[in-house]
Structures are given as structure tokens and as C-alpha cells.
Image (tube, rainbow, N blue to C red):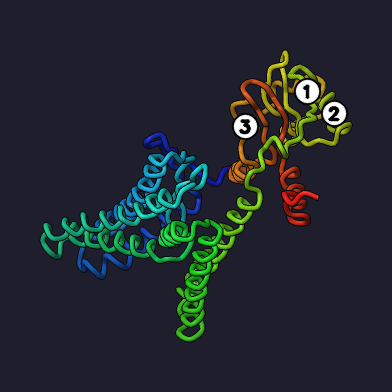
Amino acid sequence: MFRNTVKIFKIFGIDVELDISWFLVFFLFSFTLSRHYYPQALPEIQDTVYWILGISTTIIVFISVLIHELAHSLMAINEGIPINKITLFIFGGVAQMKKEPELPQAELKISVVGPLSSIGLSVGFGVLFLVFPRGIPCSEFVWFLARMNLLVGILNLIPAFPLDGGRILRALLWMRKGSLLSATRIAVAAGSYFAFFAMGIGFVMLFFSGSVWGLWYIFLGWLLYQAGQSSYSQVALKETLSGIKVKDVMSDQVQVVDTSISIEKLIEEFYKYKFGAFPVLEDSTLKGLITMNRVKDIPVSQWVKTVVGEVMVPLEHCLAVDPDEEAVDAMMKMASEGAGRALVVKGDSLLGILSNTDMMRLIKIKTMFGSLESGD
């Protein structure tokens, strides 16, 4: 299966990945610094030195972004929120939390520490700039990094959700109003105004001055607007489905297959039950999951000789959720991992399957009829 990220290492127990877009921006940023910025700042130096400076600067910039995201991650872990991974991509980086903060104080701490780390790096590079003599490559190198980190810190403090500044605004509103949904609505609205402002600047730059940089402003503004709307929808959905457990939504009438049956027999089961996947057991012990996608490329001539146990997804690679977990949290896990279903497991026992279809059915019912708390 094609992956759009590449794992590079693990730090503090957190996987760090590069999105494929990172390689594009690495080349473009290095090229721009090597062929335009440094030749203007440091004239009459060999091209090799320009390229060394450009590539080195780009690497340190992304290390700075990684430190920014690590600051978020370590504070989240300190607040009891596990981190899935950190991904560096074309516009910076993101720390993927397994769940959202449950208290505004936690969100405030997690959000503010990232920009503070960038500003701290800026101060550090600024001190180095004061130490080095003017006009030498090292001096210009640290001066650029000082300004870049300051810019990253300031931009992230803009109160436009879901930027760090927008999350800080939401946390403060959440503490004051006591409502996450209301706080998110206001923070997203502020982010939307900023997004439209950025897009407006982009259109002015594009159509009145002919600058292609206007396209970036338009694109970034649109991304910010979409991210804010998506975040609000998630919070609204979480509020709507609050209190509903996985066990209330899952399918408990589960058809299973044995590891020893052939693919030919399995395909008969697909036709018979119209399911897209089956949990796999061996001597009543859950071993994994078999899906249609796992068998679609097996040649017909191999159907009789190949058994399910050879091609199933092993249990350790399956998404498993607890029956007492919030259904909406389980749905978010499924979405983040691109899984169409999750095994509902308690200890070593399979209790059911939670699928996207189950969740969509629940959302439809809640949308049409709301809550049944009012009785008759």
C-alpha cells in the first residue's frame, strides 16, 4: 500500500514522520536561499558556500519546527494526552494527539508552549548573532534563523483557530463561558475572519499588482477556513453524541471465520452475509481481521490452497476499542487511521464490531429525532 509519509526516527517515544510534500518544500526553500537570499546578503562568495548555507538553513528551520511540535507533544503527554506521531509537511508540522484536552487549562498549556519555544529559539539565535562578527556566513546564518523562528512564533499566536493562537483564545473563552462548543464557535469565527482577510490580500496582490504570491495567501486562507470549520464540526458532533458508548452502537451479532478456511470458502461467506470483513478466530481466540481488500488480488488459482490465516490482518495491527469508550472518540480513531471498522474487545474477548455504517446510522437518528430524554 502506498504511504504518503516516511518515518525517520522516534524521539521521547514519539514517531516522527515526513510527509512527501516536505521533500518539495525542502528543495524549494534550499534553492531560494542558495540562489537568491544568501547571494544578496553575502555577495562575492563561492556558489558552493551558498548551497551549504541554503541547505543547512533549511535543515535547521525544520529542526526548529520539530522542536515547536515536540514542545506541544511533551506538554500534552504531561497532561495525560498520548501523542500518536509528529508529521512534518509543506507548511510546517503537526503533533497528532490521540484525544482532545478535556480541560481548558490543559489546552492553554499545550497551545502556548509551542509559540514560546519558537520565540525562545529566536532569542537563542539572536544572542549568537550578537557574538559573531558582522558580514561573515555564520552571522547571516543565525540572523536568518532568529528572524524565522520569531516569525513562526508570532504567526502561531494569531487568534485564528486552529492555529495555536486560536486554541489559546478558545481555552480562555472555555474557562470563562464553561462551554467548549460556544468557545469553539467564537474561536472558529475569529479564524474565519482572518482567513477571509488573508484571501482578500491574496486577491489584491494577484489582480492589482500581478504578484503570484497572492495565490499562496488565497490558498493558505482557504486551508485555514476549512480547518476551522472541520474542527467546529468535530466538537459539535462530540457534544451531540456525548454519553453514547461504543457498546450502544456496535453490531454484537458478529459472524466470524476460522484461520484455517480457504479463500474460496471465505468468498462464499462474503456473498452469503454481505459483510466487507470478518473477525478471524483460532480455537475461539481472536487472531485478526480479514477484509475483501486483503483477498482481492489473490489469483483465482490460489483460492483453494490459501487459507485466511495467511492473509488476514494480525490482531496487533487491527484497530480495537473498548465497549465503554465514547463512540465519538472511537469514530475519531477510525477516521485518523483510515479504518472502516474497529473490533470491540474486552480483555481477550470479541464483543462486536463498530463500523462507519453504525456511526452514520446513529448520527442520522440523532439529527432527525434528537435525544429521548424527554420521555413520552
**Circle 2 Cα neighbour tier, 10 Å, few/some/many (<14 / 14–19 / ≥20):** some
Give percent across and percent down for residue 61: 33, 54
Which residue type does callout 1 highlight? Answer: Val
Q: Which residue position is annotated with label 2?
A: 269
- Is any atom of residue 35 visible in this view? yes
Residue 342 or 44: which is nearer the viewer?
Answer: 342
Q: What percent of the width, then of the height, locates residue 130?
A: 13, 60
From the viewer's perspective, is residue 305 above or below residue 197? above
How far, Cα to Cα, is label 2 from label 1? 9 Å
Q: Nearer the viewer, residue 177 or 78?
A: 177
Taking depth in this image into account, of 105 and 294 the one nearest to the observer is 105
Give the label on residue 322, or none: 3
Q: Residue furthest right?
A: 272
For the N terminus, the quadrant is top right
Residue 320 visible here: no
Q: Spatial distance from mark 1 to mark 3, Cα to Cα?
A: 22 Å
Instruction: Identify the element where label 1 is drawn.
Output: strand
Marks 2/1 in contact by CB < 8 Å: the verdict is: yes
Marked residue nearer the N-terminal end (1 or 3): 1
Is 231 placed left or right of 252 in the picture? left
Q: Which mark is residue 292?
A: none
Q: Which residue is mark 1?
A: 257
Give the crowd class for mark 3: few <14, some 14-19, many >=20 residues within 10 Å.
some
For residue 185, side relative to residue 345 (left or right): left
Q: Amino acid at mark 3?
A: Asp
Q: Residue at the location (61% across, 22% down)? A: 347
For marks 2 and 1, the one nearer the N-term is 1
Query: x and y percent of residue 129 in the render?
Result: 16, 59
Which quadrant of the figure has residue 334? Answer: top right
Q: Residue at x 41, y 44 (%)?
A: 76
At 56% across and 58% down in the image, what residue appears? 181
